[in-house]
Image (cartoon, grey):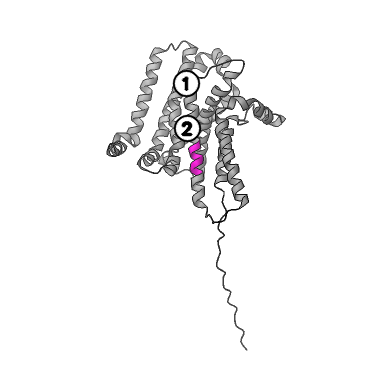
Amino acid sequence: MNKMIDNILEHPVSNTWNLFWLLSSLISIAIVSAILKADLSSPEDISYLIGYSVRWAIPFIYFVVAASSLRVIFPGKVSNWWVRNRKYIGLVFAVAMAWQAVFIFLLSTFHRDYYFGEVFYFRDELEGTVGYIFLVAMMLTSFRFARKQFSRLQWNVIHKGGLYFLWAYAFSVYWWNIFYYPYNETFMAPQWHDYLFYWTGFLAFSLRIVAWGKAREKDIINISITTKNNVLKKCCGLVSISLAITASATGHFWYKPVSEILLSPKWSDELSLWLPFWPLEPFIPLLLLGLGVLMLTKSYQQPVKRPRKQVHKPTQSQ
C-alpha cells in the first residue's frame, strides 16, 4: 500500500505542470459540459454557471491554505508532495476562477437589468474585485520573470495577503449561507455544498493555527517551573478553544446580538458598508481558536545569559 502511494506521488502525471494540466482540463470539461446544457440567453442559467464554476474552484484554494500546515503537523511524503505542488494547485484555482470571470462578464454585459437588480451588491462587488486583483498578482508573481521584480517582503505580502483574502471571501460566503440567510426574511435553505465548503474552509485555516502553535512551541525554551499564572493561562486557552468549536457550529444563535454590539458605534456601522468582511462575524470562532492556541503555547522563556565583556584597563606607567 505504501509503495503504491509512493508511486502515485512520484509519478510525473501527479506533479508540477502535468498535474496542473490534468486538473484544469478536468475542470474545464465539467464546466463546458454545464455550458452546453445551459441556456445562455437566460440570466438565471448564467447565474447558476457562476456558482457552479466557483464550486470547482473553492477546494483548490483550501488545499493551498492547508499545504504548509500539513507539513508542520504531519510531516511525511504526502505533505511534502502537497507543498511541492502548491503553486500548481493554486494555478488550477485560477483557471476555475477565470471561468467564473467569463460568466460574470456575460451576465453583467448582456443581462444588465438582472445583474444590477438581483446579483449586484456593492460590498460583494468590492470584495470580488479585490480578490481578482490579488489572484492576478499572485498568478503573475508565481513565475520567476515577475518574482525577481519584487523584494521577498513584497512577494510575501502579495501571496500571503492574497491567500488569506481569497480564503476569507470563500469561507465567509458559506458561513452566511448557513448561519444568516436561512434565518432572515428571505429564507434560503443551505445546500449540501454550503456545509461542505464551510467546514473544509474552517478546517483548512484551523490547521494553519495549530501549525503556528506547534512552531511557536518549538521556538520557546520551556523551564520546569509551574506557576498559578501559567496554569491559569492554559485553562483560559482550553476555554477559548472550546468556545471556538462551539461558536463554529452555532452562528445562528450568537450572530445577531454580537453583530449588534460590533456595529453599535457609528464608525463601525459605516465601515460595514465598504470594508471587506467587516465586522468579521464569520471569523470570530477562528479568532477564539487562535487566542486559545496562543495562551496554550505561552510559556516562560529561559533567560539567555550573555557573557560579560571583559574590559581591559590600560596600566598606568609609574
Q: Magenta residues?
A: 206-212
Place residue 306 in its image quadrant: bottom right
Q: Which mark is residue 246?
A: none
Q: Mark 1 or 2 closer to N-term?
A: 2
Circles 1, 2 touching at the beta carbon (< 8 Å) = no
Circle 2: element type:
helix
Place residue 268 in its image quadrant: top right
Q: Position of residue 34 (x, y in %)?
A: 40, 16
Q: Identify the amino acid type marked 1.
A: Trp
Q: Identify the amino acid type marked 2.
A: Val
Q: Position of residue 290 (x, y in %)?
A: 56, 40
Residue in the image at 52% along x and 53% along y: 220
Q: Is residue 209 part of the magenta span, yes or no?
A: yes
Q: Nearer the viewer, residue 304 or 293?
A: 293
Q: Position of residue 159 (x, y in %)?
A: 49, 38
Residue in the image at 40% along x and 33% along y: 89
Q: Position of residue 170 (x, y in %)?
A: 51, 28
**Residue that numbered label 2 is attached to:** 136
Circle 1: element type:
helix
- CA–CA distance in space, label 1 to label 2: 30 Å
Q: Quadrant of the N terminus?
A: top left
Q: From the viewer's perspective, is the residue at label 1 or at label 2 nearer?
A: 1
Residue 155 in sight in this render: no
Residue in the image at 52% along x and 19% along y: 190
**Residue that numbered label 1 is attached to:** 192
Q: Is residue 233 part of the magenta span, yes or no?
A: no
Residue 219 in sight in this render: yes
Answer few, some or many: residues within 10 Å of disc 1's Cα (few below 14, many 20 plus, some between 14 and 19): few
Residue in the image at 57% along x and 35% along y: 244
Q: Quadrant of the C terminus?
A: bottom right
Looking at the image, residue 222 lies above or below residue 24: below
